[in-house]
Amino acid sequence: MLAYLTLILTCQLAGEFLVGALALPVPGPVLGMLLLFLLLLLRGEIPPVLGQTADRLLGAMSLLFVPAGTGIMMHFRLLGEALVPLGAALIVSTLATIAVTALMMGWLAKAETDG
Amino acid sequence: MGNLQETWVYLNANPLFHLTLTLVAFQAANWLFLKSGRNPLLNPVLGAVVLIVPVLMLTGTGYGTYFEGAQFVHFLLGPATVSLAIPLYRQWHRVRRSALAIGASLLTGSLTAILTAAGIAWALGGSPTLLASIAPKSVTAPVAMAIAEELGGLPSLTAALVIATGIIGAMFGPMVLNLIGVKDWRARTRHGHGQPRHRHRPRASGQ
């Protein structure tokens, strides 16, 4: 478990390093995720303990948003002022995104099975 | 009584207090969420924030002081993001055959999400900071926050918007899908936060 936690942190560190060194426009942890994914592709399987370690971290993921979410207390004024643009953008955009993605997927999947 | 006051002052400045507050608030909110049969309105992250903010306000604690304790939890977002490689790999074999269709759908969906969110907020007079904060709202929270930071938005506002997106998606998503008549599970599963209703969803597609 500790070994895989080390691997995960090493991937993150490598990601952060590459992002900084090459001035890439992606977040370090995202690049770290891609690095780990590539390692898994090379290996061809997920070591069971790595799977467990990742599942445990991901199982607690909701909790990890709480500190950042609490930061909303610094933006109450902004939130109050921008309630209309934020609310409208959120609702319309979320529903439109679901509809577009699903329609596209349904359409392409059908084309795939038909073709 | 002087001792009590001193102890409080000491503890309030100690990271342990706000770290514990974060965990306790989340446990309580999560208990309520599960008890309600996973009602999206009782999202545990939202619940925890609703419990924590009044405590901080009543005790006159600034976000900076709170974060000194909460940062230990926050830090794990990075490793958790890296860990998403595991569900990604597990899904890889399952989705590889329809990779093109999924890739194209996700690309169109992502563009729709970014353009409609930023477009509507812009049209209604949103500031550049606001646009940068809402543009990544349909991405999984840790990544969305990193993107917002990159764009010059407010990561904590983005976190709140991602959660709100998940709640809206969970409440109205099934309705939209039924309305347009989509049944393919590959088209129906997306966005971790809003997914608790689909308990039998394919493993790990939720993040």
Image: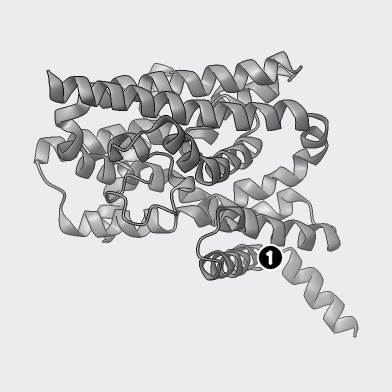
Dot 1 amino acid type: Asn
For residue B157, what is the image quadrant? top right
Judged left or right of residue B99, residue B75 is right
Left or right position of B38 against A90: left
| Residue lying at 30% horizontally and 27% vertically, measured from the top left | A106
Q: Nearer the viewer, residue B179 or B95?
A: B179
Q: Chain of mark 1?
A: B
Q: Could you say which is closer to the camera, residue B90 or residue A14?
A: B90
- Quarter of the image for residue B35 reads bottom right
Q: How is the image coloured?
A: one colour
Q: Position of residue B101 (x, y in %)?
A: 25, 23
Which x, y percent locates residue A21? 40, 21
Q: Which residue is mark 1?
A: B14
Give the vertical position of A48 relative to B9 (above or below).
above
Vertical comparison of B25 with B173: above or below: below
Image position of B115 (left or right of B56): left
Image quarter where the N terminus of chain A lies is bottom left
Q: Secondary structure at mark 1?
A: loop
Q: Quadrant of the C terminus of chain A?
A: top left
Vertical position of residue B125 compared to residue B194: above or below? above
How many numbered discs, if any? 1
- Residue A27 sits above or below residue B36 on the image: above
Residue drawn 73% across and 20% down?
B126
Q: Is residue A31 visible?
A: yes
Give me the residue at 71% from left, 14% from top.
B123
Q: Residue at x 78, y 77 (%)?
A: B7
Across and down, in percent, residue B82 comes to 35, 42
